[in-house]
Image (spheres, rainbow, N blue to C red):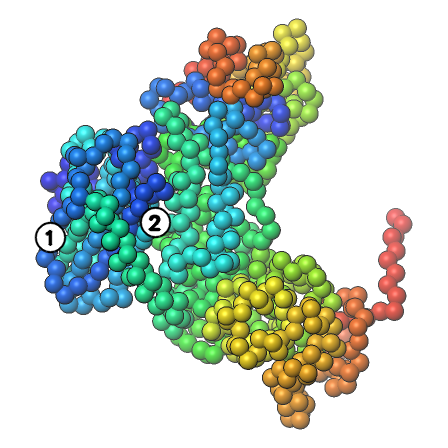
Amino acid sequence: MIIAVSGKGGTGKTLVSSLLIKSIRGKGRDILAIDADPDSNLPEALGIQVDRTVGDIREELKKDTAQGNLPTDANKWDILDYKIMESIIETPEFDLLVMGRPEGSGCYCAVNNILRKIIETISQNYDYIIIDTEAGLEHLSRRTTQNVDVMLVVTDPSKRGILTAKRIEELSDELDISFKNMYLVLNRVKPQNESVILEKVKEIKLDIAGTIYEDELIENYDMEGEPLINLPEDSQAVESVSQIIEDYLMR
Amino acid sequence: MFEDIPVDVSPMHEGERIRAAKMFVEFAGPKSIGAELIQVEEDVQDGSIEVLGPELTEMTQGENYPFGISVKIQGEKLEKELEGVIERRIHELSNYVKGFMHLNQRDQIWCRVSQEAHEAGFTLSHFGKALSILLKEDFPLIENIAVTIITEESEVKLFLETARSAYDYRDARARELSDEDVDVFYGCTMCQSFAPTHVCVVTPDRTALCGAINWFDCRAAARMDPEGPIFELEKGEVIDSEKGEYSNVNATVSEKSQGTTERVYLHSLFEYPHTSCGCFEAVAFYIPELDGIGLVNRDFRGQTPLGIPFSTMAGQCSGGKQVEGFTGLSIEYMKSPKFLQADGGYQRIIWMPLELKESLREFIPEDLYDKIPTEENAESIKDIRKYLRENEHPIMERLSQTKDSNEETTEITELDAPSDFTEWEDDTTPVAYLPEMSVPGSDGVRIILKNARVYAEKVIIKKERK
């Protein structure tokens, strides 16, 4: 099952992604986390240090090609396959692939096309793939999230967050991308404002899968750079995401 | 056939990855050393499977071990030249074995065995056996096959040396591979999303314009992703080997460009040059005043002698258009002996950026190297002419010859610019540069200007009020 987490930057995509991993791990399922947001910090939220991203590999290959460092009859498909595998961070409970920065100047169509195929092949080896998508809508228009089973759209109570969520919903409709299921996740909700927010998000034609309330502990984790995956089991956010999994993401 | 192998062997397991969390041991890869090599030999004991060093049963879970896959084959019709091709199949065939992961090739392999396979009693000699059966099945030319799996570090080190010298030999041969040596080229339509009529033709002598993929890459891609944008292209009948025109290349390009481009010369800038997508590494452009060709690469930020930078030029000849006198190309192609061979190759090159020139030092004929000006020597046509004359570039001889032998007219309606046109050339920058433009004429006459430059004393840009 491929789960994509989208929404405006800063609304809590990474929180939701890391808590999804937290709740699914340890149940004998093979999990691949993909950090597809160049500005995100999913590795930090998972408490992992990353040395090399897919973006770095792309640049290395470009350099090696230009300098003629590659064996003549070697093909880039196999080389990329190896390097992608090498860049995956393997932990006992889940694996992590970081996409890294977008391409520089020059043409990357060919390389990106190969990369997409390789990642598709690798993905088939996992029960759960959780993608922390890049903020905004590019992943939709570029159709990199085409095969997603479930899309969780995260928003906080901010006007812009809600607007982005609405546009994600509209765009996927326009582009005729069929996510089998698409749900809204509300984050950073103050209990006293909940009814107002619920009213506001009605214009986004999506069911609400779960609500995460404003939490001082999460703010502290963010401030101190503590991995969010270490949030205590009884935190409301953790419980809420576990419930989402139970309600919507179980096969 | 595989009955005594305790795990399933089938193509359905291709693409299987063994996660660290599920592996028993790892071979070669980033944390150890290893290689694979196929050698054609005279005397091969068929069916021999040997493990040199510890077997899986003697290994510790979670560890990395050095790894060598040495395959010797014999067959009446087997030639040494086939070693590389057969060796490339090891990757796919190894992955047929459930619980065995194999990545990459040569001395860059990376393998893993799953815990599940280990628990089922799978050993390295089972692996060797599966591999020998699969290879023989795939290549009926193989009459006898012997496989040795090496896990003893000192032995793997020795094996690496043998393997590397074999790779070097093969690389040298592959570098010599040319368009004549193969029957199949490759086509790529990956860029059609933004250049809907562009078809890249990739041959041993001509890498894709983007520089990203060569003939070997295409061969792999067409096999890995048969439904993908890279496809086999039988070259068909040779129409003109000098210009690089092939019957089936024409037919396929015509089909895939929806009839827009009907003929392609792979190695010429004139008449029917290869079309350009948008992402080429460099552009070759005709400089009519000097009857020579300039080169400019994407990274060059300055102005070309045509008075425009790379970006503007790229805009004018991209999008899948066939524009005579312009073609997008890769830097790798400039290293090919067939580089614009129909036009004279480097003999015809009269300008290129310094950085590009330096990167091609080994490939530009030595006697020409200092005769080709860069932005350091000349920026205008006038200065280039001066430089070419002073350095006795062969183009000067060509120029004087063309002047003598009265202009040849290729089309009845085509008029060349007046011969004193070149003298009129000065340092001013054209306000517009058009590789080709039509001017509406009357009485059924169409006036086509090629390589036109528009000079103006004053350019007034006015915003119209609505």
Vertical placement of residue B371 versus B164, above or below: below
Residue B423 visible in rendering: yes
Mark on residue B47? 1
State the image coordinates of residue B255 (x, y, percent, origin top left).
48, 63
Q: Callout 2, which amino acid?
A: Gln
Cα–Cα span, label 1 and label 2: 26 Å
| Local SS, label 1 | loop
Vertical placement of residue A147 versus B401, above or below: above
Residue B264 visible in rendering: no
Query: Residue A194's quadrant in the figure?
Result: top right
**Residue name at image x 59 percent, y 33 percent:** A39
Vertical placement of residue B465 versus B256, above or below: above
Residue found farthest to the top: A192
Q: Callout 2 environment at 10 Å: few (<14), some (14 to 19), or many (20+)?
A: some
Q: Earlier in the sequence, mark 1 or mark 2?
A: 1
Q: Nearer the viewer, residue B155 or B297?
A: B155
Number of on-image labels: 2
**Residue name at image x 34 percent, y 33 percent:** B19
Q: Nearer the viewer, residue A146 or B206?
A: B206
Residue behind mark 2: B108
B291 displayed left or right of B226: right
Quarter occupied by the N terminus of chain B:
top left
CB of mark 1 within 8 Å of CB of mark 2?
Answer: no
